[in-house]
Image (cartoon, rainbow, N blue to C red):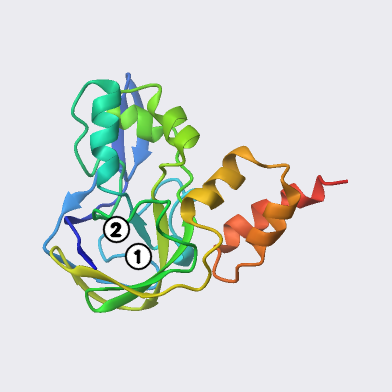
Amino acid sequence: MAQILYLHVGKPELKNWDGKEELSAIGKNRVTKAVLTKESFHGDGVAATEFHGGPDRAVCFYPAEHYLKWSAEFGRQIAPPTFGENISAPGMLEADVYIGDTYELGESVIQVTQGRIPCSKISKNNQIDRLLNRVIETGYTGYFFRVLQEGIVYEDSEIIFLERKQSEFSVLRANEIYFHQRKDYKAIEDLLGIEELADDWKKNLEKLLMQKN
């Protein structure tokens, strides 16, 4: 059990990065409460629909500990929620959370579906060119939840572990396969065997298997 550190929502808006305008929802605003539906928090939205949004990616989580790591590595303070997450908490690193894990969050119930697929906006928003590559290299991407039960979430809601469906593929292990072990077909097949894995990941992993022969 952990208490979330904040609750953020936000709609896409135009950002000016290096003189170029780009639509992004990475900049979110703190709220005291929000209704969480199967699709998203009320008041939340996405711009890059290929990476974010939809029932399998209704809630974005980023582990609190990573902010200290990135701040130390790049020699400057990187403050939340600059990765565009809705919620964060300590003690829920990618290595310790498994695909299919189910949690109570406020009045809602949520389930881990996939690691986040980071995009260049992470680097642009933080003005650190190497950040995106380091997030992918480490697998410290954060992750997404689907919503099993809708309800109100408060800024001080607790996130309470309920159930673990499998104990072979943590989010970090799944990230390692997805990003770095794309020819480990046995691991890909095993990962695909997890019913709770996000549909988008299943489709992409199935494409990798088609390259097997």
Relative to 42, 202 lies left or right: right
Q: Secondary structure at mark 1?
A: loop
What amino acid is labelled 2 in the image? Asp
The x, y position of residue 93, in whole percent, is 35, 51
Mark 2 lies on residue: 44
Q: On residue 49, which mark appears?
A: none
Mark 1 lies on residue: 40
Q: Is residue 50 visible?
A: no
- In the rendered view, would you say 149 is above or below 117? below
* Residue in the picture at 40% in, 56% down: 96
The x, y position of residue 4, in whole percent, is 20, 60
Crowding at mark 1 (Cα within 10 Å: few <14, some 14-19, many 20+): many
* Residue in the picture at 40% in, 23% down: 130
What amino acid is labelled 1 in the image? Ser
Q: Are marks 2 and 1 in contact (CB under 8 Å)?
A: yes
Crowding at mark 2 (Cα within 10 Å: few <14, some 14-19, many 20+): many
The x, y position of residue 133, in whole percent, is 46, 28
Quadrant position of residue 97 = bottom left
Q: Is residue 97 visible?
A: yes
